[in-house]
């Protein structure tokens, strides 16, 4: 053992006394080997088992993250698996972490491999379904309506797949001007979820994409397993763009169908859902135009009838007639008023003449004309009074005698 290695085992390394690589590797290996065996679950992405080799190599990937590890195991373990392992299969491995000093790599040394059966997969999907439902990710009120005519449609599907063909052909048949942005990803296996997540993030950030379609043809439960992945379901729920799920056929129901804003039974149905039918919309426009035309004509006819009724009224049909009739009535009433005034004046003049005649007959002037006279004297207070008795005056009292044509003065003389 060298002095440097001896120092490495005795004290922590320093810049003046560093550890050699082999010492660091051995210490890491010692620490890892003390971890003991663990149970690990993942998806098989690569199997390397050459004939004649006693050791097989498997790459095990986390389905929800871009993390993988190498697993080594005896070849007999792979041959004993029923059904045989294939890429994309979910397995549970009992293994011990191992650090290889020569390459400085970490791997798992497996002594037992258990394929995850269909029953276990369905049970896990059901547990996840209940969890997501309890969080409200399936609630109808959180689902967003699809745009009537999207500016652009994002499509996530397998490369050159029948699902891609069905969506594009049916959408373009209904609305030839529809614009698609297609991102091809793996739709099954261990690489499916990470690739779909990246494609979803890209399309969700595109301002020209108003709706996103995830499409895949039918398959087994294992084939459709990525579309029941918890990470993918939560990403779909958090997306800002409405998402249409078109996975498999009518009987298939991955969890993505429940989280998406719209579920289509097939990719063909998705192509018919994301865009309207140009023929139907054209017919609807023609129908609405006909209805608007009929409504406008009906309204114009009604207004014309109302206008005709207004014009036929006497006040508008003969506007001068009422004025002329009123003018004639005014003239007649004025003449009647004039005659009434003249009649009243005549009656009043006759009454005045009669009153004057009666007054003249009964007045003193008429009496004076018949030879009578009115004798007046002045009393002690200086007031002029009519003499009614000889006892009212004394001798020498001056009298005023009024006759019909004037008055004379006289003095009272003693009787003789």
Image: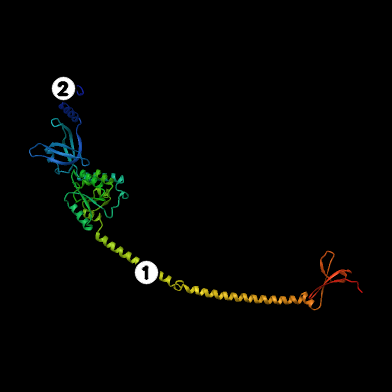
Where is residue 32 shown, x and y percent of the image?
19, 30
- Check the image and report above or below for 10 versus 217: above
Residue positioned most to the top: 3
Nearest to the observer: residue 96 or residue 242: 242
Mark 1–mark 2 distance (CA, rounded to whole Å): 110 Å
Does residue 180 appear anywhere in the picture?
A: yes
Residue positioned most to the bottom: 370
Nearest to the observer: residue 38 or residue 59: 59
Which residue is at a point 84% across and 70% down the rendered structure image?
399
Give left or right: position of 251 versus 350: left
User: Badge 2: how crowded within 10 Å, few (<14), some, or many (20+)?
Assistant: some
- Toward which corner of the image does residue 194 lie, by quadrant? top left
Instruction: Give the quarter of the figure containing the N terminus.
Output: top left
Instruction: Give the quarter of the figure containing the C terminus.
Output: bottom right
- Check the image and report above or below for 230 versus 413: above
Where is residue 256 shown, x and y percent of the image?
25, 48
Mark before the other along the chain sequence, 1 or 2: 2
Label pair 1/2, CB-CB below 8 angstroms: no
Which residue is at a point 37% across and 69% down the rendered structure image?
301
Where is residue 33 shown, x and y percent of the image?
18, 30
Q: Report the mark closest to the observer, 1 or 2.
A: 1
Colour scheme of the picture: rainbow
Q: Which residue is mark 2?
A: 4
Q: Which residue is mark 1?
A: 301
Residue positioned most to the right: 416
């Amino acid at each position: 053992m060298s002095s440097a290695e001896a120092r490495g085992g005795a004290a922590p390394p320093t810049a003046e006394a560093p550890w050699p690589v082999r010492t660091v590797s051995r210490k890491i290996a010692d620490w890892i080997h003390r971890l003991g065996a663990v149970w690990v679950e993942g998806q098989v992405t690569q199997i390397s088992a050459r004939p004649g080799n006693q050791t097989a190599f498997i790459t095990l990937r986390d389905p929800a993250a871009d993390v993988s590890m190498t697993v080594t195991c005896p070849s007999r373990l792979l041959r004993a698996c029923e059904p045989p392992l294939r890429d994309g299969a979910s397995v549970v491995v009992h293994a011990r972490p191992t650090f290889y000093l020569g390459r400085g790599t970490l791997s798992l040394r497996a002594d037992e491999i258990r394929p995850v059966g269909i029953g276990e997969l369905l049970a896990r999907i059901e547990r996840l379904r209940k969890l997501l439902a309890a969080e409200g990710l399936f609630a109808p009120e959180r689902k967003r309506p699809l745009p009537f005519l999207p500016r652009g449609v994002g499509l996530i599907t397998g490369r050159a797949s029948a699902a891609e063909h069905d969506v594009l052909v049916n959408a373009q048949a209904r609305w030839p001007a529809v614009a698609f942005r297609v991102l091809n990803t793996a739709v099954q296996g261990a690489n499916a979820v990470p690739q779909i997540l990246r494609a979803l993030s890209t399309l969700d950030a595109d301002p020209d994409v108003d709706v996103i379609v995830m499409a895949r043809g039918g398959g087994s439960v294992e084939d459709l397993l990525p579309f029941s992945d918890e990470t993918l379901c939560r990403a779909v729920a958090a997306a800002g763009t409405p998402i249409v799920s078109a996975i498999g056929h009518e009987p298939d129901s991955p969890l993505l169908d429940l989280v998406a804003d719209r579920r289509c039974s097939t990719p063909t149905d998705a192509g018919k859902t994301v865009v309207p039918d140009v023929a139907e919309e054209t017919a609807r426009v023609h129908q609405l135009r006909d209805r608007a035309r009929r409504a406008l004509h009906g309204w114009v006819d009604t207004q014309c009838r109302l206008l005709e009724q207004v014009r036929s009224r006497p006040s508008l049909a003969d506007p001068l007639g009422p004025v002329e009739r009123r003018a004639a009535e005014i003239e007649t009433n004025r003449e009647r008023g004039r005659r009434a005034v003249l009649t009243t004046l005549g009656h009043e003049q006759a009454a005045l003449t009669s009153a004057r005649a009666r007054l003249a007959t009964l007045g003193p002037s008429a009496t004076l004309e018949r030879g009578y006279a009115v004798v007046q004297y002045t009393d002690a207070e200086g007031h002029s009074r009519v003499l009614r008795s000889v006892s009212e005056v004394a001798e020498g009292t001056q009298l005023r005698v009024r006759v019909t044509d004037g008055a004379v003065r006289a003095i009272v003389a003693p009787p003789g």
